[in-house]
Amino acid sequence: MSKQEWAALSGIEKAFMINAFEIDILPGFWSDLDDEDRDRPHDEIAGILLGLVDRGWVEVRRIAPWISPTGQKGYQPGELVPRDRLAAVLADETGWDYPESGDWTGALTLVETETGRKISRRSPEEID
């Protein structure tokens, strides 16, 4: 990755990439947006996410339950939402809010791909 590539991303794209890096559920991306971007139409924001998916930088998955080796309950990225169903899934605005029940199972989460990691992380040469 170069600083130029990261700098060329819009604020919304950066928020999605941060969310994917953190493997947070989709609503977590709202906290990385500035006020102006929060007011954009929902379908426009969803279209930006679809662009990152189409570039191969991000996958959209469903959260699945997970149990650690010590028996602690948690969550992990689960089933991939197929690209041909993704636009319809993102059109459902409930997926963009934290679940009222507090149970994240089935919620949407963003996951970086190998290609996406090259955008969100600096290369060893850039770190030096």
Image: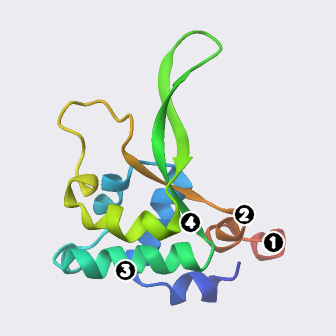
N-terminal of the pair, mark 4 or mark 1, is 4
Q: Residue furthest top?
A: 71
Q: Which residue is mark 3?
A: 47
Q: Is residue 32 left or right of residue 119?
A: left
Is label 1 or label 3 in front? 3
Residue type, label 3:
Gly
Q: Residue at x 57, y 81 (%)?
A: 6
Q: Is residue 80 left or right of residue 124?
A: left
Circle 1 SS class:
loop
Q: CA distance from mark 4 to mark 3?
A: 13 Å
Circle 4 SS class:
strand
Q: Position of residue 3 (x, y in %)?
A: 63, 83
Q: Which residue is mark 4?
A: 58
Q: Residue at x 26, y 57 (%)?
A: 96
Q: Which residue is mark 1?
A: 128
In the image, 74 versus 63, the foreground residue is 63
Q: CA distance from mark 4 to mark 1?
A: 27 Å
In the image, 119 versus 92, the foreground residue is 92
